Amino acid sequence: MGTRKFIVVGAGPAGLIFSILAQGDVVVLEDHARPGWPPHCTGLVSLATARRLARLAPQAPGEEYEAVSFYYGGREILRLGGYGVLAVRIRRPLLEEELWTKALEKGVEIRSQARVRNILRNGCVEVAGENLCGDLVVASTGASQDVLPSKHRLWRLKGLQAVAEAARRPEEGVFSVVYHEAVSPEMFGWIVPLGERRLLVGLAAASRAYERLTVLLRMADRAYGPLRLKHYYGGTVLRGPPRPRQVEGRILYLGDSAGMVKPYTGGGLYPISLTAPMAAALASEGREGSYDAAVSPLKRQLLAQYRLTRLACMLGPRGAAAALRSIRLAGLEDEVSRKVDYDSHEELLRMLLPSAHRLAPGIAAGLLGL
């Protein structure tokens, strides 16, 4: 078999990791002039995911967190952690910048400000008045499906974040998750220390994101303020589910465009760290047809997380907070802290099911008392 030619649409982490690891001629087409811009991601991942990403982008991993505090409004209901690093913040867009540089060093052709108008199942794309064709098109277009030949219904929320400087230094190594109807009916808010007195305050919601972020900023201001706001940024938060088929004709869907995200948090870096190297290895051997089977265990995991996320959304912020508070009321805080995995949210449910009889009274009390 001769040298294979790959056309990668989108220079996010998924497309860039594929382009670095694929054996063959690679052309990357990217809408924007600068990698990773405009920024939109919080970047929290597990330590294992951070280590996988650091193999290609060693400067990208940033702050480490050993615990997470869950709040309902301004009241702490549960804290998990204390047994090593629970989560690591991947610095964006530094991740993309490192991957971009490594791809160029490898000899990958990257065309910036190259707007793709259409992706065809025969391995061709329409861009800037010409058609480019290859053995495989890697569709790593992020949240956008405008140019994809096969649309997939995804659960979308609006993510919005503010970087602020706090008057009082937040507790180091602890990030916060905030549930409240005024913050987000569908998800939650987060307050993530960025070192010194800087905070990342954000949320995802279906509507009124700026209004809801103002509520969350007021909560953060009471805890750490007065706050000095530096800047805002945001984007689409996807919650899945995965595409039923990840390969169609000569198109391989990768990353967010494939619906391969952690639904509860909307995080895509964990699936990307696993699937992009796998896709590159199989495609280099001309075996992309086996990619769907190869990623099926991960798809099952993300589907389980998706169902759990749907349940949490049905419960609403008060119900989700009550369920978390019941862990503490049942005396399971330490056991869960020892076993919790930031990337495998569905494991928490499996872990707690045998103790459901101990949790039920706490959930009921929580619903009444929160």
Image (tube, rainbow, N blue to C red):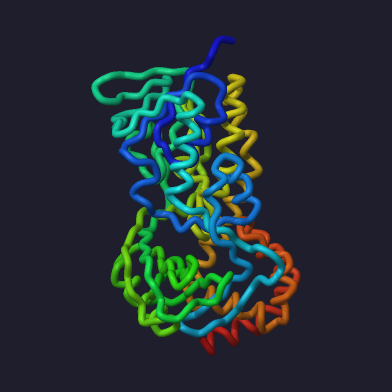
Task: From the top left corner, tell me how far across and down residue 117 is, in percent.
Answer: 29, 30
Quadrant assignment for the N terminus: top right
From this view, report whether residue 114 is shown above or below residue 87.
above
Task: Give the residue drawn at x 42%, y 49%.
Answer: 93
Q: Quadrant of residue 23?
A: top right
Task: From the top left corner, tell me how far across and down residue 79 is, in percent.
Answer: 61, 76
Q: Residue furthest front?
A: 196
Q: Nearer the viewer, residue 324 or 227?
A: 227
Q: Nearer the viewer, residue 296 or 106?
A: 106
Task: From the top left corner, tell me how far across and down residue 252 is, in percent.
Answer: 49, 30
Query: How many marks can you see?
Result: 0
Task: Give the residue drawn at x 62%, y 70%.
Answer: 67
Task: Give the residue drawn at x 48%, y 31%.
Answer: 103
Q: Is residue 317 left or right of residue 230?
A: right
Q: Nearer the viewer, residue 213 or 17?
A: 17
Q: Residue furthest top?
A: 2
Examine the rendering and report whether any part of residue 130 can be seen. yes
Task: From the top left corner, tell me how far across and down residue 343 is, in percent.
Answer: 61, 56
From this view, report whether residue 233 is shown above or below residue 255.
below
Task: Give the residue drawn at x 62%, y 45%.
Answer: 52
Examine the rendering and report whether any part of residue 306 can be seen. no
Q: Residue furthest bottom?
A: 369
